[in-house]
Amino acid sequence: MGMTRPFASVLLLLLAALAPGRALAAPDAEPWPRWERHDAGATATIDHSAWDGWLKRYVSADPLGVARVAYGRVGEDGRRALARYIDGLAAVAVSRHNRAEQRAFWINLYNALTVRVILDRYPVESILRINTSPGWLSIGPWGKKLVTVEGEMLSLDDIEHRILRPVWRDPRIHYAVNCASVGCPNLRQEAYTGARIEAQLDDQARAYVNSWRGAHFEDGGLYVSSIYKWYVADFGGNETGVLAQLRRYAGGDLAQRLAKTDRIAGYHYDWDLNDAAQPAAE
């Protein structure tokens, strides 16, 4: 028997409250030394054109600026194209590339894997419903090994918390990796590339900070994404650091109001799936 809608909603809220590292505190950034290897002088590039085409085909912005994925419109051709792209990345000797190529590689791989996780369980209301991580009380799919790169089996948590965060120590990573949720920074409608990664990350940061999901004022108080609470260590370690991050990328009225603000009134996050709700098959 299926769950009643009220019970399902309560369960989803409970899962959000219990989601490890995503509601109470973030997983620590624990370096995995073997992934620090790189070739600073390497000039070879990694081809992300297949992922770029996939994103342009299935991702679009809604009227509020939230990037939505047409999961229901992804047929067998789209699934095979995504699988070929992921398999192609898995075959790359990423440690032989320079840092810029590596960072684009890991972000694109993370996002492509997340999309595949959703497609494998679609339709689903939230990624929090996909409880495939090992451990009895584990929530979500982030701890499950999903891909093998250079002989190492990796999970989404491995890519984010053991590679991207500790190697680059750049808070903009949080604006780039996507957790398939409305509250998350947008899944970019183009692939990241080594040649453009810096500009792309800055663009992602500006877009999120200046969106309602990133920061907004309500009843005179500043409300920001829970990302700034979960990962406060990456944003300076306290509210002062978070405010500095917001001021760096804010524009217009938000920038003016942030200049006069010295505290955060509250945090928010929407775990609903970033679904375009277009169920027709391709």
Image: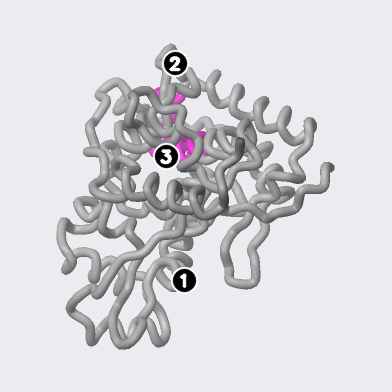
Instruction: Specify how the rendered protein is coloured.
Output: one colour
Q: Position of residue 111 (x, y in %)?
A: 52, 41
Q: In the image, which residues are magenta?
A: 94-110
Confirm whether residue 113 shows in the render.
yes
Taking depth in this image into account, of 121 and 216 the one nearest to the observer is 121
Q: Residue at x 43, y 12 (%)?
A: 151
Where does label 1 land, which residue? Answer: 211
Q: Residue at x 46, y 19 (%)?
A: 149
Cα separation, mark 3 vs mark 2, equals 16 Å
Q: Which quadrant does the C terminus fall into?
A: top right
Where does label 2 land, which residue? Answer: 150
Type of amino acid under label 1 = Ser
Q: Residue at x 32, y 31 (%)?
A: 137
Q: Is residue 204 above or below residue 209?
A: above
Q: Is residue 145 above or below residue 58?
A: above
Disc 1 element: loop
Where does label 3 land, which residue? Answer: 103
Type of amino acid under label 2 = Glu
Taking depth in this image into account, of 138 and 3 the one nearest to the observer is 3
Residue 38 marker: none
Confirm whether residue 187 shows in the render.
no
Side of 204 where 170 appears, left or right: left
Asked if the residues shown at circle 1 and circle 3 are in contact, with their CB atoms under 8 angstroms apart, the answer is: no
